Amino acid sequence: MAMNKLKERFLQSSLRNKLILAFACFIIVPFFVVGGTLSWLYVNSNRTMLLDAVVENNKQVIKNIDTSLQPIMRLSILPMQDKTLLQMMNKDYAASPYPLYEREKDFDTAGGIIKNSMLLNSDLIDSVVIYQNTNKIILGRSHNDYMNHAYLQSDFANESFVRKVLEKKGENVPIGIHSDQLMSFRGTPVVSVGRAIVDPYTKEDLGFILLNVGIDKLKTLWSDIHFTNHTRFYLVDEQQRLIYSQNNDEIGSLVSDVLGSEFDSIRGEGKDYRQDREHYLISATAASANWTAITVIPKSELFGFVNTIVQTIAISLLVLLVLSIITSVYIATGITKPLLILQRKMKLVSQGNLDVTIDIQKGEVGKISMTIDNMLAEIRRMIGQIYRDEQEKRQLEMLALQSQIKPHFMYNTLNVIKWMAKIQGASGIEEALGAFSAVIRFTAKTESDFVTVAEEAAFIRNYTHILDVRYFNKFELSMDIQPEVMSYQTLKFLLQPLVENAIFHGFDEIPYKGKLGIRIYEETGHLVMLVTDNGRGMSQQEDEKPAATGGQLNAIGMDNIRKRIELHFGDAYGLWITSGPDQGTTAKIIVPIINGQGTGE
């Protein structure tokens, strides 16, 4: 169901969105699959490589320790192999005639053997002590600068590391971190190799030898490699005390106090490294001394460089992804934008706007655009030609219609003047000729088909004045015109045919005085002109008769009014006549309001 909805939405979406979605699928899916796989492989391979490098470094440190301690261990057996030292270890100086002299002589001899046979064979040895059990004395030592005699008399022989050496009965014993309080004024921390000196014949414990190595010299066995800024390296002895730490205050402390109890059991796990949530702990143990090298590396720093590379790759890929999406949007927009423009312009054309120019120059849509532009240009040309032809046709029709009016009007006017000249004196003729001049002047205006309502009303007054003279005051005229409409424009001669019909037809042979009323006013946005008379009226058949002479209805004039209104204003406007036998006639003209500039209000 959900798939059908998605499919339906996809089908209904725009072409631009479909193209963008297609481009995005072809870009994003490979990006995440390929980019994710490569990033995982890169991180995993670098993680293994870095951890292996740290493991190998620890193993190399332990190998260096084993390699350096082996010669010292071999040197510790010298007192049992050197006859001179072995004889001195068996002496009881208290029984000697000259005990002090004998001790000093043997002390110098033992010191010479230590310097020549031991110190010269190892650069790591800081000091050497040979202790004799029989007399509880130091038989020989590597230097004569300082010795703590009080410590020698009270505590030295009872130290735990001394007891451990003696318990091993002649085996070499690596001794972890401890203070050299015998020959060091400040109790310098050292590690040692000790061996009990046993008479090879009697198996009697004669004493022991200690070869001390200073921590500073021990540091020369490994390179100061910092895999990260906060990498920590420790060397732990068999008692899990720190032989070495980058923080000198931690030397001699229990490893659990420094690293935490979870690292207590690091030795003996059989693993090169272990990890917690934040650190990797890499360890290696020396076979000769049972000492352990431990490297602690924060995970965040171990993979800091890798993460930086991965982030750089990820950012680069994201930038490429964004650029690819922008490019796909640009391409999709480039394809669909001309189509959208074409659609929008064609919608305007469908609404009747033929002045649209599509103006798309490139691509297949550009060719369609040029074809449509040419088609619209041809349509506009044809419409213009039709409009010009229609205007010319209207002009000719107007001229033809007006030509029907002028001869008839001139005939009636001249006939009136003839009658006036026959029955009246010169004053009447002068008055009639004044009115006739005004009528002729109005008729001769050819610059426009439109006149103001005031001009049309003045023309009707002059025209009816002439007719009134002819018919000897047979009718009277009343005009009711709103002052507001006097400046409005209207077509010339709209009222004249109606007035002519009322006088010549409506008042013909009536036994009473005719009344002709003209009312012009504005109503609901239109200009309304009413011409009413109390004449004999007419039937529907008479309204439809063609023009005739004498008292016949001027049908040509009525048809002229209708055609002129239709040509200029359309079918919504026109002339309506209400009449009946002996009921008078009412003619109603409705035209649009045209202000003094010739445009509708």
Image: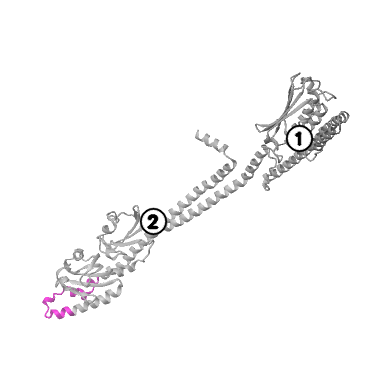
Numbered disc 1: secondary structure: helix
- Between the C-alphas of marks 2 and 1, the distance is 106 Å
Query: Which numbered circle lies on residue 300?
Result: 2
Looking at the rendered image, the quarter that the C terminus falls into is top right
Say what secondary structure mark 2 lies in.
helix
Q: In this view, does 92 lie above or below 386?
A: below
Residue 41 shown left or right of residue 174 in the figure:
right
- Between residues 127 and 516, which one lies in front from this camera angle? 516
**Rendered image: mark on residue 458:** 1
Q: Where is residue 158 in the image (x, y as percent from the top left)?
A: 16, 66
User: Dot 2 surroundings within 10 Å: few (below 14), some, or many (20 or more)?
Assistant: some
Residue 488 sits inside the magenta stretch: no
* Rendered location of residue 47, percent (x, y): 41, 55
Q: Which amino acid does label 2 sit on?
A: Ser
Nearer to us: label 2 or label 1: 1
Residue 196 horizontal side relative to residue 411, left or right:
left
Q: Name which residue type carries label 1.
A: Ala
Q: Say which quarter of the image contains residue 479.
A: top right
Determine the residue positioned at 48% across, 53% down. 314
Give whichever of 51, 33 is nearer the camera: 33
Q: In this view, does 456 lie to the left or right of 61?
A: right
Start and end of the magenta stretch?
Answer: 76-104
Question: Do we see residue 204 in this rendering?
Answer: no
Q: Quadrant of residue 192?
A: bottom left
Residue 209 percent across, percent down from the top left: 22, 70
Q: Which of marks 2 and 1 is nearer the N terminus?
A: 2
